[in-house]
Amino acid sequence: MREKTMTRKQVEEPKMQMTIRGMGLSLLVGNPTHKQKVVVVMGATGTGKSKLSIDLATQFQAEIINADKIQIYKGLDVVTNKVTTEECKGVAHHLLGIADPESNFTAENFISAVSLAMKSIIGRGKLSIIAGGSNSYIEALVDDENHEFQSRYDICFLWVDVAMVVLHQSLAERVDRMVDSGMVEEVRNIYKHNSDYSKGIRTAIGVPEFDSYFRAEYSSFSDEKTRAKLLEVAINETKINTCNLARRQVEKIYRLRDVKGWKIHRLDATKVFQKKGKEADMAWAELVAGPASMILNEFLFS
Ligand code: ATP
């Protein structure tokens, strides 16, 4: 039988976990001389923020607070690309699918909800990881009027970045997968004639884009060929708008880093997206998960 040898990472990981369970928690929980620590994982849609947050949460005894302004609403799990129970790997998630889809969840609502979630997470002796999505929510949280958040918390910002041309390809493929997983039925279920697409869950990319298609479905005058064409247009618009969203999100991260001076650690995941299967997993570990875990180790324990 071939002898199993442990890699350096495998040898070091248990040590690191012991540190976290032992000495580390005194740093995380209520030490009056230290600020509490919190991690913020940023990045454009589809870059792997959720995956990284879960990887780090399993390693550093953390719970995740969702900051995606659309995933906060109940429903549209496929369209908004919510993590599945299996993908969560047992890590507790907060602010995921909690708001009434017809309501308008605001940045103020987000700030109060984060504050409550963090209190309960800290009470359990755990680390909070605020995961991605809306930059305006994260900006409102971190740069609140009285700088209260920054005075109470030491923040480590991680940014999962993917070269835009590579990300666009992957986002287009993701929309095709969403369609295969029931996206059209999901949006049809919330379709209302003359709905307001300016608030609540109906602002999600993938909802207003299908309006003309559903109108045609409900109309007794449309033929099958027209409907097929409208469906194709809706899917294409969803792809284009998702790519535009990704571009805007990255521009905002650059502004927070370069204009506002936030110290954001950039992790380049481009090569992960250019590989498949095991090779992609290895690239992820080497280029994203590994460096992120070293940054957190330094942040939490130095
Ligand atoms: P803005 O001020 O433009 O709303 P933001 O920084 O607050 O930007 P983003 O996370 O960039 O928030 O989201 C902007 C828009 O992108 C949302 O209003 C919504 O249309 C779309 N969007 C964001 N997340 C999702 C998602 N998970 N699924 C579908 N659409 C989304």
Image (spheres, rainbow, N blue to C red):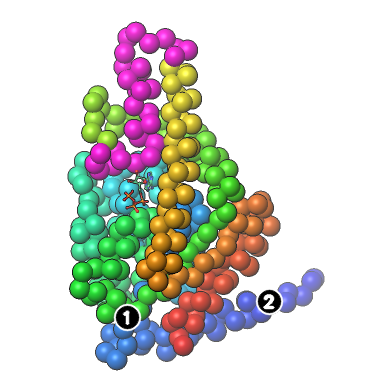
Q: Which residue is mark 2?
A: 7
For residue 222: magenta?
Answer: yes
Q: Earlier in the sequence, mark 1 or mark 2?
A: 2
How many dots with numbers?
Answer: 2
Q: Which residue is located at x 20 percent, y 59 percent?
A: 108
**Residue 282: x percent and y percent?**
65, 62
Q: CA distance from mark 1 to mark 2?
A: 33 Å
Q: Which mark is residue 6?
A: none
Magenta stretch in the rendered image: 198-226
Question: Which residue is farthest bottom?
Answer: 33
Give the quadrant of residue 204: top left
**Residue 111 appears at what percent x and percent y?**
23, 63
Q: Amino acid at mark 1?
A: Gln
Crowding at dot 1, Cα within 10 Å, few <14 / some 14-19 / many 20+, comes out as many
Q: What's the mark number on residue 36?
A: 1
Q: Which quadrant is the N terminus positioned in? A: bottom right
Identify the element where label 1 is drawn. strand
Identify the residue at image location x=31%, y=17%.
218
Amino acid residing under circle 2: Thr
Is 256 within the magenta?
no
The x and y percentages for residue 49 are: 47, 59
Residue at (48% x, 25% y) in the render: 232
Of discs 1 and 2, which sits in the foreground? 1
Q: Is residue 290 left or right of residue 131?
A: right
